Amino acid sequence: VIFLIFCITILSCEKNTTNFPQVNVNLNLFINNPEFFNLNSPGGWIYLNGGVGGILLYRQSLEQFIAYDRASPFNPNSDCQIEVNEDNITITEPCSESLFLITDGSVLQGPATQALIRYNTYYDGQNLTIFN
């Protein structure tokens, strides 16, 4: 009976696996540079090179940044890159037409079921490091 319960438990657990490619990310940015002007205030964002499909860097607050990989979590091997919509609140992956929220990368509309891939960030007040 215990073995049967164990088997049922293992088989019923949903696997949270991803086929997202693993790449090394280690970027250091001096946020006061003019090229990062759009990041001066919360809600600002820019696209950067790096990651699998590029990086979307979003300033969530004065002291916190979020870095998303621009490759699609639905199909990371496609050439589609996520794009910030004109409302500056949502992000679209144009090939699958999946929709995500910029503030946390969560899925608003599928077919994607996985949130955007995030990289770690560390901000000391002047320098921002994006890494994995």
Image (cartoon, helix red, strand yellow):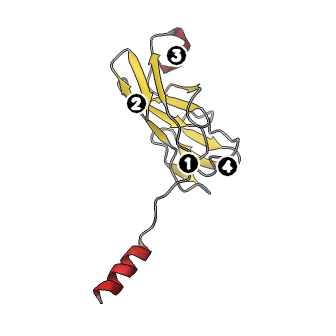
Asked whether, in this view, residue 13 is left or right of residue 89, the answer is left
Q: Residue at x 63, y 42 (%)?
A: 92
What's the residue type where badge 1 is placed?
Answer: Phe
Query: Up-down: is 10 above or below 28?
Result: below
What's the residue type where badge 4 is placed?
Answer: Glu
Query: Up-down: is 16 above or below 53?
Result: below
Helix, strand or loop status at disc 4: loop
Tag 1 and tag 3, C-beta contact below 8 Å: no
Which mark is drawn over residue 20?
1
Which one is earlier in the sequence, the residue at label 2 or at label 1?
1
As measured in the structure, the alpha-carbon distance from the residue carrying label 1 to the one carrying label 3 is 28 Å
- In the picture of the structure, the residue carrying the numbered disc 3 is 36
Helix, strand or loop status at disc 1: loop
As measured in the structure, the alpha-carbon distance from the residue carrying label 1 to the one carrying label 4 is 18 Å
Pick the front one: 123 or 23: 23
- Residue 1: x, y in percent? 30, 90
- In the picture of the structure, the residue carrying the numbered disc 2 is 121
Tell me the mark number nearer the camera, choosing from 3 and 2.
2
What's the residue type where badge 2 is placed?
Answer: Thr
Q: Residue at x 50, y 49 (%)?
A: 115
Which mark is drawn over residue 97?
4
Which one is earlier in the sequence, the residue at label 1 or at label 3?
1
On the image, which quarter does residue 49 sit in?
top right
- Residue 66: x, y in percent? 44, 33
Asked whether, in this view, residue 31 is left or right of residue 122, the answer is right
- Residue 107: x, y in percent? 53, 51
